[in-house]
Amino acid sequence: MQTSSKSTNRLCRLFQLEYPIIQAGMAGGTTTPALVAAVSEAGGLGTLGAGYMSPEAIRQAIRDIRELTARPFAVNLFILQEPERAPGEAQQRAQADSAWHLLAPLRERLNVREDGPPAVWSESYRDQLAVLLDERVPVFSSTFDAPGTDTLAECTRLGIRTIGTATTVREALLLQQAGVDAIVAQGAEAGGHRGTFPGEGEPPLIGTMALVPQIADSVQVPVIASGGIMDGRGIAAALALGAEGVQFGTAFLTCTESGAHPAHKAAVLGSSDESTMLSRAVSGKYARGIRSRLLEELEPLAGQLPGYPAQNALTQEIRRAAAKAGNPDYMAMWAGQASPLALKTTAAELIARLIGEADQVLSRLQRFT
């Protein structure tokens, strides 16, 4: 895993990294400028999870990161249609109104006072993207869909590298056709939201070990393995499967610089291999998190709840109230299936540990060839 400016690793060359290690863009406050900068300073690629941030907040965070590091970093956005263009928006609005009444007992339990459903469900992707282009961020990372070819062409013109997220070979091919520089292969073990593109029915839940080699065999751009990888053993396995880098989310969530709620960190550090569940009931899009009363109470209602981002907006104040009260029962604590391997450490210490472990595993495996 030792690299240099003459590295043969394509990701290191593309993003000017010491190590092909990427910190996932976990939205919701986990990826503080301090965490992003610490990862980049340690030789990896830190990523600001900006999916829920206003354009003004994104701009400030980018400038804060640049105050802390001169090294490359990424900003991750959720690719969503603008509300006025979203198909079935009126129908979803009616469903959201109905769901808002269903959630009344939860709001009452958490002392949340709302006069009605939120008027706006999400930030404008178009406006968020404009900030990234204006600031010329080093890397634009995306999930939930493929960026438009015009967007990617503009990124190329501005010298911005791009990363897309795929949960199937079909999505990976669409990303490559659109023109991204690298692709994250997100396995079913991953914590947080599935990056699955829009479509009907349940998302394909292809495991990391099955997904990575299939995508690596199908595309020409570098592949980044993601999902259930927490240590050097996972890095070695990902490289053996054809990936050229690894993206870690849950592993960085418990770092000192992470902005995750203390109760969230504690839940991850105290989790077992059976602690997580996959549900769309919290946000309207399938996501993996620590099992809690919130997930378990909403799950039976899933068929009556709207999709993302409407449902995410409907539960937002409930989750905020729980976090403010330090009540993990009603927080959404996203985490991957390998969460028991999480450590309480700094980002720099974690990266050093990952590299050391990977080198040991790869050296040991060489003795069997």
Image (tube, rainbow, N blue to C red):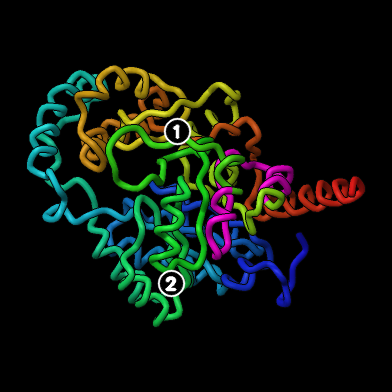
Of all residues, the one furthest to the bottom in this rendering is: 157
Kind of residue indicated by mark 1 = Arg
Is residue 326 at all visible to an observer of this figure?
Answer: yes
Which residue is more in the foreground, 326 or 243?
Answer: 243
* Circle 1: element type: strand
What number is the disc on residue 183? Answer: none
- In the rendered structure, are the residues bearing label 2 and label 1 in contact, judged by CB atoms less than 8 Å apart? no
Is residue 253 at all visible to an observer of this figure?
Answer: no
Q: Which residues are drawn in magenta?
A: 214-238
Where residue 55 appears, x then y in whole percent?
Answer: 28, 63
Using the rendered view, name the quadrant where residue 46 is placed: bottom right
Q: Residue at x 27, y 24 (%)?
A: 302
Where residue 103 appears, x then y in whole percent?
Answer: 20, 24
204 vs 227, left or right, is left
Using the rendered view, name the quadrant where residue 18 is placed: bottom right
Using the rendered view, name the quadrant where residue 4 is placed: bottom right
Q: Residue at x 23, y 40 (%)?
A: 313
366 vs 354, left or right, is right
Of all residues, the one furthest to the right in this rendering is: 367
Mark 1 is surrounded, within 10 Å at the Cα level, by few (under 14), some (14 to 19) or many (20 or more) other residues, namely many
Specify which label sits upstream in the sequence, 2 or 1.
2
365 vs 90, left or right, is right
Q: Identify whether 329 is placed above or below 318.
A: above
Which residue is the site of mark 1?
288
Which residue is more in the foreground, 229 or 54?
Answer: 229
Which residue is the site of mark 2?
137
* Circle 2: element type: loop
Where residue 175 appears, x then y in whole percent?
Answer: 42, 60
Q: Residue at x 38, y 30 (%)?
A: 331
Kind of residue indicated by mark 2 = Val
Q: Is residue 255 magenta?
A: no
Q: Identify whether 96 is placed above or below 362.
A: above
